[in-house]
Amino acid sequence: MTTTIMGPARARWFAALARPRSRALEDARQSLDAAALVTRIGGAASMLRSLGVVPGDRVALLGPPSVEFVVAVLAAQALGAIAVPMSPRHTEGELVHVVSDSDPRLLVLASTQDERLVSIGPERRRVGLDALAHVDAAPLEPVALEDEAIALLIYTSGTTGRSKGVALPWRALIGNMAALGRAWHFGPDDVLSLALPLFHVHGLAIGIFAAMLHGVAVRLHPRFDPAQVVRDVADHGASVFMGVPTMYVQLLAHLAREPDDAAVLARARLFTAGSAALTPDVFHRFEAATGHAILERYGMTETLITLSNPYQGPRRVGTVGCPVQGVEIRVVDDDGRPLDAVDGRMGELQVRGSSLMQGYWRDDVATAAAFDGPWFRTGDVVTIDACGHVRIVGRSSTDIIKSGGFKLSAREVEDVLREHAWVADIAVFAVADATWGEHVTAAIVPAPGCPALAELRAVLTAFARAHLADYKCPRQWLLLDELPRNGMGKLEKSALRRRVERDYPDDVDLRAIQTR
């Protein structure tokens, strides 16, 4: 009979949880020190064990960010189960897909009466987060597992089809978060203000695992409120804030109303951004207001954090930095041949290293297609500058437009048009064209007081032609009240493209048309 030995990454994680500290995890209702957190996890693990959870089982979790939610995730993992966090924003069909695909032993729910899960049927055992919160404290005795065991099963956003489960082993999760925490100088004197969702690697992996691995106290919030970030810094000693670009836009709007709060935010140590592109305008305005240059980084669910701007040294606006420890990158052309990307040529970013996923859950075909040997195909097109900093040009599927034999970046067009005062928000994407292959289309959220579509088109077309080559200028314009985005603030350009190709061959003001 063989005995399973606790892998060093998994052992490091549970040892870090038990390290004494007066503040470990808190939300608006409670604050736990390390000892209380560990015994809460131990008690919840005992309850999950009594409900039949064993190593290798999946435990699906649905609820807002809270102490109870994190305790439930860590309790399932302590038993050797695989935590499967689900998005509270998902529809019934999306939740049913995740449950059907992951086949969990148990559902842990903020509400056991959630109507979106009625169709799953009573055979799936359920327990409420509140029930786990009221169990007796117990010692935490994590099951011994090797580091290739799966820690998390995170479902992708599904922008290119049905979401796939990304299997992240302990080896990748803890190794990558350890490297990131060192790079960002995380330590026990830090307090993290966290309002990111916990069904995504940005909030769960970086916000919980990277922070707590290094002794950082985490303050959880169920939703983002700029004023709460200010209060966290002023009243609770928050030194780190992690956000997506839309959060920084809202923070800047708050500072415009409450300019004195900029001095409060200046007391923090680090502001980071990811999950979507940060515009140069937001970067510069935030730095001017607070003195902080936002640290932008890059990663994917499948790769965890791959690139980061430096903690010390210049943070280059518009770039996502250099590889973190344990990660190698290369850039390849359309035929998969490696490029010397430092010369400025665009190519697909590929990644290899210890931070990569084990694969897509029960989908060997998709897993094989995602890799070129040991290299993961990110699908992101990049350039690299002479200093080795990577600039994301866009997704190969939505942000690289091939028109009339030219290849161009949608993001470059967006950056130019965003400078015009009439543009509040913009998405540039390709639409199929019988003559040109694809043509450039711009979806605009106009600023207040803008003229009608015909005049807006004429002015913005002239503006584009003054700053861009003719083949980069939009041929089609749409006006919208808002752009479609997913839960992490990423533009859903594929949905826009499908709608335009189906319904709107010409310019159109969609603000006056009922959404279909």
Image (spheres, helix red, strand yellow):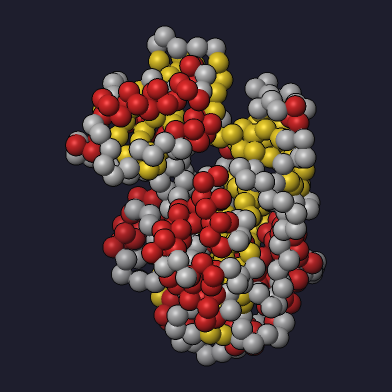
Q: How many marks?
A: 0
- Does residue 225 appear left or right of residue 326 in this picture? left
Determine the residue positioned at 52% across, 19% down.
469
Give left or right: position of 436 versus 269: left
Percent across and percent down for residue 299 are: 63, 48
Corner quadrant of residue 429: top left
Residue extending furthest toward the top: 435
Residue at 49% x, 30% y is 413
Q: In the rendered image, which quarter is residue 223 located in?
A: bottom left
Residue 69 makes an appearance in the image: no
Quick one: quadrant of the N terminus? bottom right
Q: Is residue 375 above or below residue 278?
A: above
- Compared with 53, 197 (above or below) is above
Q: Is residue 237 above or below residue 368?
A: below
Residue visible at 38% across and 64% down in the picture: 257
The percent position of residue 468, horizontal first and vertical second, equals 51, 23
Q: Residue at x 47, y 22 (%)?
A: 466
Check the picture and name the quadrant holding the C terminus.
top left
Q: In the figure, is residue 420 to the left or right of 479?
A: right
Q: List the single residue furthest toward the bottom.
A: 136
Residue 36 appears in the figure: yes
Q: Position of residue 143 (x, y in %)?
A: 69, 73
* Residue 88 picture location, percent across and down: 39, 61
